[in-house]
Image (cartoon, rainbow, N blue to C red):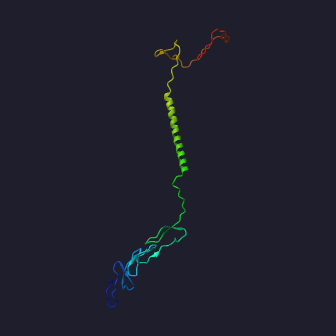
């Protein structure tokens, strides 16, 4: 009972929760059907058949749309018992690259990797070679000269170069006499090294 009767009006009734009025005067009640269901003739409910949907409470199921409303759209999701198909705008997309590498591409990538490894290892190898050569070189031996005036003897008979003179730079002494006297001299020429 929604409202009791009065001297001028009849009693007003309403359906209990989960039921709806079957006519305008609410003379009878029917089971309320939810989304994804439709009412039947025997005042009950049944699920929407395949390919149909009901998105409102206590309504008859309708068929899914067969296409999108706009030619610039495409179907992105199929319909369900409670919703129609879902459409979305077509976006110009770049073709997705093939994820699988091709055999020729694999060879090119391998060659590039080998070249990078060699080019990065080459300076290291050259540097190691020069370092090894430098460490293998022995210090130069001292120049041996015959024992004589101004020479010194070191370590069991090894003769070293003469000791340096008092000055680090000396002018040559002038020779006395004419050039012709040099040619007439009977001294043999000696080459000093």
Q: Position of residue 135 (x, y in %)?
A: 48, 29
The answer to which quarter of the image holds residue 52 is bottom left
Task: Work out whether residue 170 or residue 12 is closer to the camera in this orientation and state it.
Answer: 12
Q: Quadrant of the C terminus?
A: top right
Q: How many marks?
A: 0
Q: Position of residue 32 (x, y in %)?
A: 38, 78
The answer to which quarter of the image holds residue 71 is bottom right
Q: Of all residues shown, which one is farthest toward the bottom?
A: 7
The answer to which quarter of the image holds residue 29 is bottom left
Q: Residue at x 49, y 28 (%)?
A: 136
Q: Residue at x 39, y 77 (%)?
A: 45
On screen, residue 78 versus residue 193, left or right, reads: left
Task: Work out whether residue 181 or residue 61 is closer to the camera in this orientation and state it.
Answer: 61
Residue 113, above or below 48: above
Residue 66, above or below 166: below
Residue 167, above or below 46: above
Q: Quadrant of the N terminus?
A: bottom left
Q: Residue at x 51, y 33 (%)?
A: 129
Q: Position of residue 94 (x, y in %)?
A: 54, 59
């Amino acid at each position: 009972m929604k409202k009791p009767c009065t001297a001028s009006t009849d009693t007003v009734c309403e359906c209990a929760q989960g039921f709806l009025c079957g006519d305008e005067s609410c003379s009878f009640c029917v089971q309320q059907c939810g989304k994804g269901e439709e009412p039947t003739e025997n005042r009950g409910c049944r699920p929407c058949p395949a390919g149909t949907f009901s998105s409102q409470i206590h309504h008859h199921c309708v068929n899914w749309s067969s296409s999108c409303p706009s030619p610039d759209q495409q179907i992105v999701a199929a319909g369900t018992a409670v919703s129609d198909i879902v459409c979305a705008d077509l976006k110009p997309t770049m073709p997705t690259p093939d994820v699988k590498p091709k055999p020729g591409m694999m060879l090119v990538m391998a060659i590039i990797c080998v070249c990078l490894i060699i080019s990065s290892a080459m300076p290291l190898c050259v540097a190691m070679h020069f370092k090894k050569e430098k460490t293998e070189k022995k210090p130069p031996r001292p120049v041996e000269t015959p024992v004589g005036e101004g020479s010194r003897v070191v370590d069991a008979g090894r003769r070293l170069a003469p000791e340096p003179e008092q000055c680090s730079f000396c002018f040559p002494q002038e020779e006395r006499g004419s050039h012709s006297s040099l040619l007439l001299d009977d001294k043999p020429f000696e080459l000093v090294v």
